[in-house]
Amino acid sequence: MSGNGRHPHEAAHPTNLPAPGEIRIGVYVCHCGSNIAGVVDVPEVARWAGEALKDLGVVVSREYKFMCSSPGQELITEDILNLGLNRIVVAACSPHLHENTFRGATARAGLNPYLCELVSIREQDSWVHTDHDAATAKAKAILAGGVERVRYSAPLDPITVDINPATLVVGGGIAGIQAALELADAGFHVYLVEKDASIGGHMAQFDKTFPTLDCAACILTPRMVSAGTHPNVTLLTWSEVTRVDGYVGNFTATIRKKARYVDADLCTGCGVCQEKCPKNVIDEEYEAGIGYRKAIYTPFDQAVPRTPVIDRPNCVYFQKGTCKACEKFCEANAIRFDQQDEEITVDVGNIILATGYEIFDARQVAQYGYGRLPNVFTSLEFERLSNSAGPTNGRIVLRDGVTEPKTVGVIHCVGSRDRNFNNYCSAICCMQSLKFAHLVKEHTGATVYNFYIDMRTAAKGYDEFYQRVMEEGTLFVRGKPAEVTEAGRLPGEEGKLVIQVEDTLAGRQRRIPVDMVVLSVGLQPRTDAKELATRFGISCSSDGWAIERHPKLDPVATMTEGVFIAGCVSGPKDIPTSVAQGSAAAARVLGRIQQHHMNLEPIKASVHSEQCSGCRICNTACPYNAISFIEADGVSSINAAMCQGCGTCVATCPAGAISGTGFSDEQVMAQIQGVLEFGPDGTPRDRSPFPTAGPEPAKEAVGI
Amino acid sequence: MSRYLYYPGCSMASSGRSYRESIAGVCEPLGLTLTEIDDWNCCGATEFVGVSISPAYALIARNLAIAASERQNGEPLVAACSACYLNLAKADAYMMERPLLNERVNEALGAGGLHYDPGTVEVRHLLEVIMHDVGLDRVKAAVKKPLTGLRVAPYLGCMLPRPDPHNRWKNHERPDDLDRLLAALGADVVDFPLKTECCGGHMTQIAPSVGLELIRRLVDEAEDHLADMMVTVCPMCQINIDAYQGEMNAMFHTKHKMPIVFFTQLMGVAFGLDPKELGIGRELTDARPALTRIGRQPLATANPEPVRRPRPDKRSLPMPSMPANDAGPASKAPSAEVQQ
């Protein structure tokens, strides 16, 4: 067989290929213990590569138990030094795992790391096949593709960018506050943006926190005050991030400060405006709909900042043109009815998203009667009921505001672990429901039933708390209630809410009359989660939870450099985990800041402007907002620092005007050629599958 | 006019005569054409499937096979009786899921020169056809005499809307289709908590104490909600509550007189048709006295519904807001006063 015969495209595209004889490739095939070697005949693949791929420049082909181990990496470095290798191909696991390991080994021997190619014969072969012979043949094909490809690889240099030491934290709940304080205490500036009038988030609504039953406000408010007064924190409440430009180290965020109609510099937070405001409004946010606030309000007494906001749709002056009671009584003259929304931009190096969650809308579970039956409450309503600063001053009473319940039923998993709504477990509801049971007992002495599917109390001190609540006499019924009905039919059910449930431990249907039902509703992503993800260039699951860079090993980073996540934005979490994530995200950012600059992967796309027709299709296709249209030149241009090298634009461009380093046409075509050029027995096929040679027709043939 | 194939079912000839007559009456104003399929047979009601599966489904599938052969443009097959609808829909779905059942049923059908491929005929219930195909706008437009002041308890019975293989009903746990339809006729609709509970079926014959207790619950509850009458979609429910109310009263020493009519009868009344032609007056618990209440003031305060409004009493807590739904039960209309 002749080299030319097997590479008909060489003549057409010889550009990047060093002269024959110059290419010296080392091939390393990994056993990965039995992960690969259990299915693929690794010694055979290595032997075959050494012989069959000799013409392509393979000088040495080795196999090793664990290539990622130190001795495995030393094989590569020593071969480069001793045998003068200038290309490396490692057949092992996915590049997601060990690409950096082998590039590092290559670089240590003085070779440009981008001349090392990792091909996956584990995820793409041994883990997904059982037929040993076929898997071995496939490993050979994948390896041949890597060898063909690496011949066209060019040395690349990383791009270096400076890191702006300021950070944007979005979301002023406990996770965001924690992240902001960690960064501020380390001496770096933080912009903490919160959409509501005060920071504090959901935690500020709670009465007690499980399992220790500390008062939520007592442990949260000192943090809120620190965040509000810290010299390194710029607090932007009643504000939203509307736009993010730039790239890691150099983001520019546009923030809309909604009009408060109160001059924050003059306001003393005395609260007289709230006293004098004639308009009572049901407080759907902080009081979860069971309490009232005024049309000018701070959400709660310990709010940070103390500056109130005017709720324009409910303000008598804004709606009817007269009133201005707040203005008349404000001694500081801080009311500004003519205030407008204001847009500001801030430059930051990193972004932490801690935007939290929403609670599941219990009205969707019609059979539990929320919204229809007065004495059915949600967990958030119950938090406000039991909170001494809440609308009932902490008295746990029925909807009439007076009567204490004698029997209470707490229903777990409302909207969670339910294929009609959310499949996932909301993680906090079991413990929250146990806490409710304890609080009801403590405040009223009522009989409490907890209706659960499974008890999930897996964290420090959680199961002990469960034991304690059991010992306090709470009754546990294992079963998901079928309905909550006001239709009593048996003696003792008159005037009660009846919970119809299959008690799966007793193996029978039960009807349990109660005075009050608390629905322990699950957590779900914020309604605008997907827009938010698009705005910050991160991805989220179909549910709407933000996706981590790695769910186990990199839970606070995202696939977008410089954008981190903390708390419930990536899924339901309890307070300790949210706080830990806030700190973790801050630590990741601090690591970046301390480096002052960072290297970015040089795998980037670029536009050949002479071929660009200016159609802008790539501008919208880019998931990272890295492509902009240069009006003056009539062509699109890619910001190398923002480009993540995904290749979408390369594939989208109708004029073929975009190419990606590390993924040039030559490399991709050569890899396809390599994968296809050997038959199942490892011998070359009779003829090239692409007799017409050039990459364009070939690309069409394989559909890329 | 939308054309549908129509499977009336046996009860339409006897206990459900009023249902049949009122359906015939409302079709014209609704723009529906129901073409009765030829030579149909009993669906086996609730009993036969419990005795022997294959013959029972063969009995039902014979009707599906006839309907399939009479289709011209893929018209759906409509049943108004809940048991008939359920049996036809189940036969179609189970034959699709279970090849062996399909084979046996078609073997039986083959003896009569018939064949049925499951999935061919779309089986639908009349209520669902009116809600989805006709639409409430058309219903409202046809109303000549709104049922203002008539307080009705919508009673769907236990055979609707589940099972629902084609996912046509919106809310399976607490369906509100009948509620919305009656509200569109102008009636004062009770939020009836037992709307999907069982009427006892044939328990009234085989275990009267069980059957009469189930009827008692329903009538008691409707009475508690100050309903003038119950409204049903099912001949079985109608006959049980209507005909056994006397026995039930005797057993429990009660004096209930709760009329129960078919929803199509009330539609007919609202459309201005002659009550006699709708079969009204044929029921054993006379519905005519209740119908004289049409036009009076609705019982606004009769049933303190959870309406969100500024606290009526200084101490009470506000109710959660509910989504606005103009076609919803009249008594559930949310107050918008404090909403943004």
Image: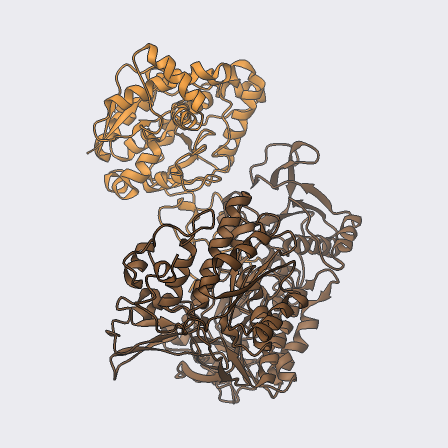
Name of the residue lying farthest toward the top: B111
Indicate the position of residue B212 as horizontal and vertical percent values: 54, 21
Q: Is residue A1 left or right of residue A26?
A: left
Chain brown in the figure, letter:
A
Indicate the position of residue A427 as horizontal and vertical percent values: 63, 55
A277 relative to B108, above or below: below
Q: Is residue A226 left or right of residue B89?
A: right
Front residue of A555/A301: it is A555
Q: Is residue A699 left or right of residue A335?
A: left
Chain orange in the figure, letter:
B
Indicate the position of residue A547 as horizontal and vertical percent values: 52, 62
* Residue at (34, 41) in percent of width and height: B148
Front residue of A56/A338: it is A56
Classify the position of the C terminus of chain A by image quarter.
bottom left
**Quarter assignment of residue A319:** bottom left
**Quarter assignment of residue A185:** bottom right
B246 relative to A459, above or below: above
A626 relative to B265, above or below: below
Front residue of A143/A401: it is A143
Q: Is residue B15 visible?
A: no
* Residue at (59, 32) in percent of width and height: A489
Indicate the position of residue A374 as horizontal and vertical percent values: 55, 50
A637 relative to B22, above or below: below
* Residue at (53, 84) in percent of width and height: A163
Name of the residue lying farthest toward the front: A1
Q: Is residue B275 left or right of residue A26?
A: left
Give the total of numbered labels.
Answer: 0
Q: Is residue B154 visible?
A: yes
The image's colour scheme reads: by chain
